[in-house]
Image (cartoon, rainbow, N blue to C red):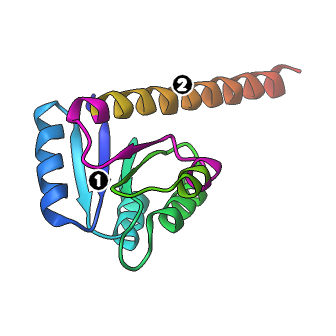
């Protein structure tokens, strides 16, 4: 099954170009030009990894990250920025961002990060599922 990626950036040309590069590499890609639109898509669709720009008009990347983690704590988010500061990176990591990449990013670096972030999400989901099964069995038979 293809990894489902949501690209969120207010630069339309950048999002379209990056989307095409990821689709060529067999990712299922959705795009969004704003934080609010991204949150709406996350509520409606199954997404594995979000690639999120830090600086956007309206709801910025850090605020959007915070809301994504409230909605779906296991959803992995890679922050993408042209001019990050150490403080912004630390804040994003504290809020649960998987990693940061600087723009412009090499496609292969992004593909590597997306793949690793998806693996982490899948591992978390499997551990939770096993724990739920274990608890169900324990309740039924004890």
Residue 65 makes an appearance in the image: yes
Q: Secondary structure at mark 2?
A: helix
Q: Is residue 104 magenta?
A: yes
Tell me what residue is drawn at x 61 percent, y 29 percent.
129
Picture layout, residue 130 above or below residue 71: above
Q: Earlier in the sequence, mark 2 or mark 1?
A: 1
Residue holding disc 1: 7
Tell me what residue is drawn at x 36 percent, y 64 percent.
38
Front disc: 2 or 1: 1
Q: Residues within 10 Å of mark 1 (few under 14, many from 20)?
A: many
Quarter containing the N terminus? top left
- In this view, the residue in front, 132 or 111, is 111
- Based on the displayed image, in which of its 4 quarters is residue 132 positioned? top right
Side of 22 where 135 appears, left or right: right
- Based on the displayed image, in which of its 4 quarters is residue 81 positioned? bottom left
Q: Is residue 23 magenta?
A: no
Side of 116 where 89 appears, left or right: right
Query: Residues under labels 2 and 1: Cα distance?
Result: 22 Å
Residue 58: give x, y in percent of width and height.
40, 80
User: Which span of residues is magenta-colored?
Assistant: 91-110
Picture layout, residue 33 above or below residue 121: below
Residue holding disc 2: 123
- In this view, the residue in front, 63 or 41, is 63
């Amino acid at each position: 099954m293809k990894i489902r990626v949501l690209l969120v950036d207010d630069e339309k040309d950048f999002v379209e170009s990056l989307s095409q590069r990821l689709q060529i590499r067999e990712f299922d890609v959705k795009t969004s030009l704003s934080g609010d639109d991204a949150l709406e898509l996350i509520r409606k669709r199954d997404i594995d990894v979000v690639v999120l720009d830090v600086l956007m008009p309206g709801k910025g990347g850090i605020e959007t990250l915070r809301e994504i983690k409230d909605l779906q704590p296991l959803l992995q988010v890679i922050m993408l920025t042209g001019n990050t500061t150490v403080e912004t990176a630390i804040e994003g990591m504290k809020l649960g961002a998987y990693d940061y990449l600087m723009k412009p990013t090499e496609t292969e670096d992004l593909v590597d990060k997306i793949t690793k972030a998806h693996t982490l999400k899948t591992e978390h989901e499997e551990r939770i599922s096993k724990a739920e099964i274990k608890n169900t069995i324990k309740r039924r038979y004890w």
